[in-house]
Amino acid sequence: MELQASKAQAVPVPSVWRFTPLGLLLVICLILPWLASPLWIRIATEVLMWAGLAQSWNIIGGYTGYLCFGHGAFFGLGSYVTGLMMVKLGWPFGIGLLFSGILASLLAVIIGYPTLRLRGAYFAIATWAFGEMVRQIATILDVTGGAFGLQLPSFLNLRYFYYVMLAVTGLTYLTTYFLLERARFGYKLLAIREHEEAAEMVGVDTVSIKMKAFALSAFFPGVLGGIYAYWVTYIHPDSVLGAQLTDFMVVMAFLGGIGSLWGPFLGAVVVQLVQRILWLFWGEGTFYLVIIGAAICAVVLFIPNGLIGLMESRFLSPREAVSQLRKTFKW
Amino acid sequence: MILQSNDLVKSFGGVTAINHLSLTVEKGTVFGIIGPNGSGKTTFFNLVNGVYTPDSGRVTFDGKNITGLHPHRIAELGIGRTFQIPAPFTKMTVLENVMVSTFIRASSLKESRKMAWEILELVRLDDKGNTQVANVTLEDRKRLELARALGTKPSLLLLDEVMAGLTPSEVKAAIELIRSLRTRELTLIVVEHIMDVILSLCDRIAVLDYGQKIAEDIPDQIVNNKEVIRAYLGERYSARN
C-alpha cells in the first residue's frame, strides 16, 4: 500500500532524464570497438546478436504469447541463404541479408498457417519439430554442403561486423518500440496473448495479426543469421541450426522479462557475458549450462516478470532513488 | 427487424443444442431469452456472432446474411457481445482493454483512447481506467465486459448473464446501467437467469428448452404460459395448477 501511495505522488520524471540512459548506452555501443581488445569486440558482437535474437523471439513468444521453439531455424535459414548467395551466385552481402530476412518471413507464414491454430505446448512442439526438420534438411542436401558445412569468403574486419550487428539489432528494437509499444498492432498482440477469443470478438482479426507477428519475428533472425555466417566464415548444421540456439533465445527473453522492450536485451547481456566469462576462466565446457539452468529456475520461481520487472520498481530518478534510500536506511 | 434466425440447427456429437430455432428481433427493442441450464441460450449467441457455424439454417443481421462469417467480421458489422464469465485482457489496464475494442471504429491510437475514456465514463469505470484488470473486483469486471462490448460501437448487443454473481444492490445498479444504454440505435438481446431482471428489462421474451423455442411473448404473458411453467417447474407442478 505504502509503495503504491508513494508511486502516485511521484513527480513525473523530466524527459531529459528518461533519455539519458538510452543516449549513454548508444554512445557506449558506438565507441566500444575503438576502446576494446579484439576479444572483447568479438564478445560484444555476440551480445548484440543475442540481444536481437532474444527480442525477435519476444515478439511472438512474449508479446503474442505463442512459445515458439523453432526460432533457431530462421537464424539457420538466414545463414545458409546469405552464404549460398555469396558463394554460389556471387551476390553482395547486403542483398544476401535482405533475401535472408524475406525468406525467413515467408517460411514463417508457411509454417504459421497450420501451426498458429495450436496453442500452448502444442504450438511449442510443432515449431520444435519444424526446427528439427530444417536442420535435417540442411544436413542431407548437397547444396548446403551437408554435415561438412559451408565455407564463406573471409572478410576479417571485426569492427565492420560489430557495426552491422549493432545496426540490425538496433533496428529490431526500434521496430519493436514503434510497432509493438506505440501502435495498435502491439495492443492487438497483447489482447491475443491475454484472451484470444475475446480479442476476436471485439474485432481483432486474430489469424492475420498472428501471422504478421510471426513473420516479423522471423525476419530479424534471418538477417542476423546472415551476418553471423559472413562473420564466422564457416557454418554447419549444428552451429547455426542446433536446438541450443532457440533455447538460448527463450532463456534470455525469460530471464530479462518477456513482453517488455528491454527485458530481452538485459537477458542477452547477462547470459552471454556470464557464459563468456565462465569460458574465459574455465575454458571450453558445459558447466555454464548448469549455472544458467539454476538461474532460470530462480527467475521463474521468484521473479516471474524477469530482471526487468525487478528493475522497473528500482529504476527511479536520482532524487527518487535518494528518498528511497533514506526510507530504507532511516536517515 | 434487425436480427433474424431462420431454422437454425447446431449439434455437438449426439446432442442437438439448437433445434430448428427461428427468432426475430425488432430494432430498438430489448429482447430477452430465458430457459433452463443447457437449453441453448449461449449456443445461440455463439451462432449469431460467429463462434460456431450452424449445421443448417441462417442468420440475417440488418438485411445481410452473416451465417458462417468470422467473429471479428461480425463485430465490424455491428454485433457486440459479452461473455458469461468475464474474459478480460488481464495483464492490461482497464482503459487498454476498451481501447482494443475501439480499434475497428477509430482511425488512430489517440482517437481510440478518447473513445475508450468516454465509454468508461458511461459505465462508470473511469476512476479505474489506469488500473490493471488483475486488481479490479468482479462487479467492475462485469462492467468492463460491457464497456469492451460497447467499444465496438454495436447496433446489436448480446448480453450473456451480465448479472450472474452480483449482489442485489449491484444488480440494481446494473439494471439502471442497461436501461440507460437502450436507445433507438442499440438493440439488446439479454440472456439472464434472474426473472425480476428479465421481466423488468425486456419488451419481448423467448423461452428455450432443449434448443427449441417453446414460447415467445410479452413479459406479462410469459409468466403465465403453461409450457414455460412446465419447463421451469416440472410436469407435476404444472398439472397441479
Image: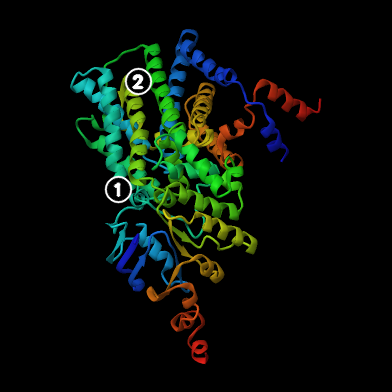
Residue located beneath label 1 in the image: A114
Q: Of helix, strand and loop, which one carries label 2?
A: helix
In front: B77, or A106? B77
Residue located beneath label 2 in the image: A232
B29 above or below A88? below
A12 above or below A3? above
What's the CA distance linking mark 2 and mark 1? 35 Å
* Quadrant housing the N terminus of chain A: top right
**Residue type marked 1:** Pro
In front: B225, or B211? B225
Q: Which of marks 2 and 1 is in front?
A: 1
Relative horizontal placement of residue A6, taking residue A154 as reference (left or right): right
| x and y, in percent, of residue A83 in the image | 26, 24
Q: Residue at x 47, y 59 (%)?
A: B159
User: As drawn, which residue projects farthest toward the right?
Assistant: A331
Q: Which of marks 2 and 1 is nearer the N terminus?
A: 1
Relative horizontal placement of residue B126, taking residue B33 as reference (left or right): right
Label 2–label 1 contact, CB within 8 A: no
User: As drawn, which residue projects farthest toward the left?
Assistant: A89
Relative horizontal placement of residue A105, taking residue A15 as reference (left or right): left
Q: Residue at x 58, y 48 (%)?
A: B124
